[in-house]
Amino acid sequence: MAQKMINRTVRKILQEVKGPLTTGEIVGRLSDRRYKNTPSIRAISQILTRDKCFVKVEFDRGVKQCLWTLKEEVQ
């Protein structure tokens, strides 16, 4: 149940930004929204990897984090 809430919140965050965010930026925005139990970067990465609506854009070696965005819906 908690994963679904995190999933919905991350989806809203990425829709508001309309661009890719790193995993750390997503966790930061979750904590800015006063999310009660902010998950770790590793937990967020696993949630984003398992859900098909999120796309990994690239891996930033300098920060050692992935850039994530929403999958474009094909009509």
Image (cartoon, grey):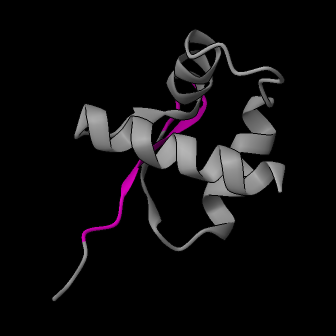
**As drawn, 54 above or below 29:** below
- Residue lying at the far bottom in this picture: please name it: 75
> Is the C terminus in the top left, top right, bottom left or bottom right quadrant?
bottom left
Q: Residue 68 in magenta?
A: yes
Q: Is residue 1 left or right of residue 30?
A: right
- Residue under the point 22% across and 40% down: 18
Number of marks present in the image shown: 0
Q: Is residue 47 left or right of residue 1?
A: left
Q: Is residue 31 left or right of residue 41?
A: left
**As drawn, 65 above or below 30:** below
Specify the segment rendered in magenta: 60-72
Closer-to-camera residue (1/17): 1
- Residue under the point 68% across and 68% down: 50
Q: Residue 75 in magenta?
A: no
> Is the N terminus in the top left, top right, bottom left or bottom right quadrant?
bottom right
Q: Give residue 39's quadrant in the image.
A: top right
Q: Is residue 6 left or right of residue 38?
A: left
**As drawn, 39 above or below 25:** below
Q: Residue 41 in the image: state x and y as whole percent.
A: 73, 32
- Residue under the point 79% across and 20% down: 36
Q: Residue 43 in the image: state x and y as whole percent.
A: 80, 43
- Residue under the point 25% across and 69% down: 72
- Residue lying at the far left in this picture: please name it: 75
Q: Residue 13 in the image: state x and y as whole percent.
A: 42, 35
